[in-house]
Image (cartoon, coloured by chain):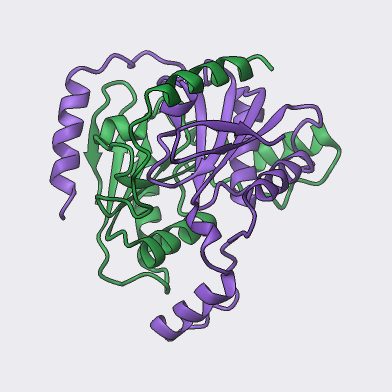
Chain colours: A green, B purple
Amino acid sequence: MAELNNILAANKEYSGGFKHGTLAIPPSRKLAVLACMDARLTVEDFLGLGTGDAHIIRNAGGIATDDAIRSLIISHELLGTQEFLVVNHTDCGMLTFTDEELQKKLTQKYKADASGLKFHSFPNLEQNVRNQVDKIKSTPFLPKDIPVYGFTYDVRTGKLGRVI
Amino acid sequence: MAELNNILAANKEYSGGFKHGTLAIPPSRKLAVLACMDARLTVEDFLGLGTGDAHIIRNAGGIATDDAIRSLIISHELLGTQEFLVVNHTDCGMLTFTDEELQKKLTQKYKADASGLKFHSFPNLEQNVRNQVDKIKSTPFLPKDIPVYGFTYDVRTGKLGRVI
């Protein structure tokens, strides 16, 4: 419980000065972001997004998995977002291993077969961004003309770089 | 491109005063959070998390999908997180529809069969939190004794409520 009490104390302070209690469900800037879970990415901060502005979808790598696509479909179809942004980043953990290596490690550690698990590690950052944008654009249940921008985020400088 | 220029301008300002360029990959507070993508949840703010502190995984609902589990395995196994926090929230869009309704809507709109898509809508908030915690705890490739806390977040008050 190392962090639990710290979190509860922080939330008490946050809710004490809470000013966002009347926001509607749909994101006010009609934007959905898909980014990596990395701790160094405070997505709202580096994109200038406030509370209520945008859907933020995050997973290991910022990958357009079936689950991320599920979230984007709900975002657009039920909550009206009209632009999507994909952000992968430099020095990503996903550049440092292969799926096969992690599968073997887990199989040995937990004495259970992990060979079927897909982790979506990738060897090239910019190509990975392009692949995720392509995957979103090829989804049959999103409009063909919805803008999908692809960016890298540099964890050393805080700067976005446009890929697509 | 309604929001693209706004985002680029905001990032220019953010990176101009960037102070986080030397952070290491592993989250400093050894914490991973699974929360909903909802625009009203600025997760880092209401949990008191700074840049570099924690992995933040987000999808529609804050569901422990296979993809969220993938991210948690990478988070723990490769980057050393030791506590997990699940946060679902009041007034969630996922409480307002059924998977079947959305499947039908998409099938009609896109003239393609959406009946196989699982959206993870849910009828009961607190039960849904329990279900996600149970799913994480039953994953074969995470330690059985890793703490997994389950919370609701009240979008009207900014307060966390402990479920499990």
Percent x, y for residue A90? 37, 31
* Outermost right residue: A111
Vertical order, A142 against B135 (above or below): below
Residue sitting at 41 percent across and 25 percent down? Answer: A40
Residue B159 in view, yes or no: yes
Percent x, y for residue B91? 49, 51
Is A80 left or right of A92, judged from the image as shown? Answer: left
Is B12 left or right of B92, judged from the image as shown? Answer: left
Percent x, y for residue B26? 53, 21
Residue sitting at 33 percent across and 32 percent down? Answer: A19
Percent x, y for residue B136? 71, 41
Query: The N terminus of chain A appears in which quarter of the rendering?
Result: top right
Please state which of residues B81 and A20 is positioned toward the viewer in this rendering: A20
Looking at the rendering, which quadrant does residue B108 occupy? Answer: bottom left
Residue A135 in view, yes or no: no
Please state which of residues B119 and B17 is positioned toward the viewer in this rendering: B119
Vertical order, A59 against B60 (above or below): above
Please state which of residues B98 and B26 is positioned toward the viewer in this rendering: B98
Q: How many marks?
A: 0
Residue sitting at 64 percent across and 51 percent down? Answer: B66
Vertical order, A71 against B161 (above or below): below
Vertical order, B118 against A33 (above or below): below
Residue sitting at 44 percent across and 44 percent down? Answer: A62
Looking at the rendering, which quadrant does residue A126 occupy? Answer: top left
